[in-house]
Amino acid sequence: MESTAGAGQLLAISDLHISYPENRALVERMRPGTDDDWLIVAGDIAETVEDIRWTLATLADRFSKVLWAPGNHDLWTHPRDTVTLRGVARYEHLVALCRELGVTTPEDPYPVWRGPGGPVVVAPLFLLYDYSFLPDGCATKAEGLAYAESTGIVCNDEYLLHPDPYPTREDWCRARVAETERRLAELPADLPTVLANHYPLDRHPMDVLWHPEFAMWCGTALTADWHRRFRVETMVYGHLHIPRTTWHEGVRFEEVSVGYPREWRKRSVPPGKPRRILPMEVGPGDRGAAPGVGGGRGSVR
């Protein structure tokens, strides 16, 4: 595993959604605090490979190391993208792009942060979801989707995120979970971890969603004990567009998303500043938005 030493910070951000000019401007202004800073980018950069490349190239030129975990928007086969690859082929194309830029992906050896707060293994993950976070009263995926359709809250993944060559997204998710679990189990038992995934490893962050049915597209119950099993110092995620800190069974969960301009304009904290993961800057507690803030969901996520 690669190591680093220095006086920098381990930072994280997600859901940059740079197709919005205001969000692209946030990336243009983003700078590290020191020459040794690392930056985790936990998915949803953009819907086109061109925009993903520009963002990662810009950040990799500024930060000592950039680590990328894919979000659902990154994996969409969007009609305005000239790259028409689907599923695993699109993901592998993005991994190759990252390697060209020197960006660490979920397919690469996990680096060790040895700066302040370290040493910890920093692992960008790609796990997807399997519809196991069902709405109350629903026992199957079919029931959950029918209920979501009745409320008008259906993720655009159903139309744009293809699992090829897997039969379903949940099959792809289970394969990703199995392979990632194997790799994490091989890490040295004396090292804590920072796990960065687009979706949280546990369902508790979804408790504040305005539309709880959207939780179906937000992770998998297969990872519910990973924060304990893999010595997690901090679990970094995005996707919900509800930036906040929560603590679950003594483990810190950080939602680090920027979100859409219509969401971040309502917040008192200026957008676009990466969240400091290490050294830790908060104690136990929840610095998050009030329940539901930023969590209102239409059919666009």
Image (spheres, helix red, strand yellow):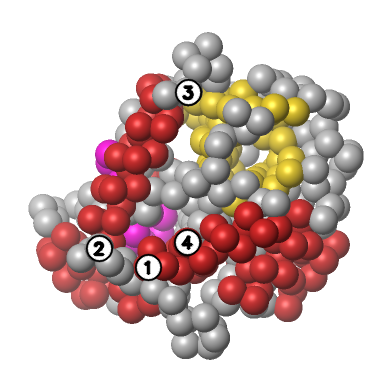
The amino acid marked with disc number 4 is: Glu
Q: Mark 1: give few (<14), some (14-19) or many (20+) Cα within 10 Å.
A: some
Residue sitting nearer the eye, 207 or 102: 102
N-term-proximal mark, 3 vs 2: 2
* Residue 19 image point, x, y percent: 64, 77
Vertical arrangement, residue 129 with respect to residue 36, above or below: below
Residue sitting nearer the eye, 283 or 52: 52
Q: Which residue is mark 2?
A: 166
Q: Which residue is mark 3?
A: 187
Residue sitting nearer the eye, 81 or 252: 81
Residue range of the region highlighted in magenta in the rendering: 209-222
**Are the residues tagged 2 and 1 within 8 Å (C-beta)?**
yes
Q: Which mark is residue 87?
A: 1
Q: Is residue 192 left or right of residue 139?
A: right
* Residue 161 image point, x, y percent: 37, 71
Q: Which mark is residue 177?
A: none
Residue visible at 37% across and 68% down in the picture: 87
The amino acid marked with disc number 3 is: Leu
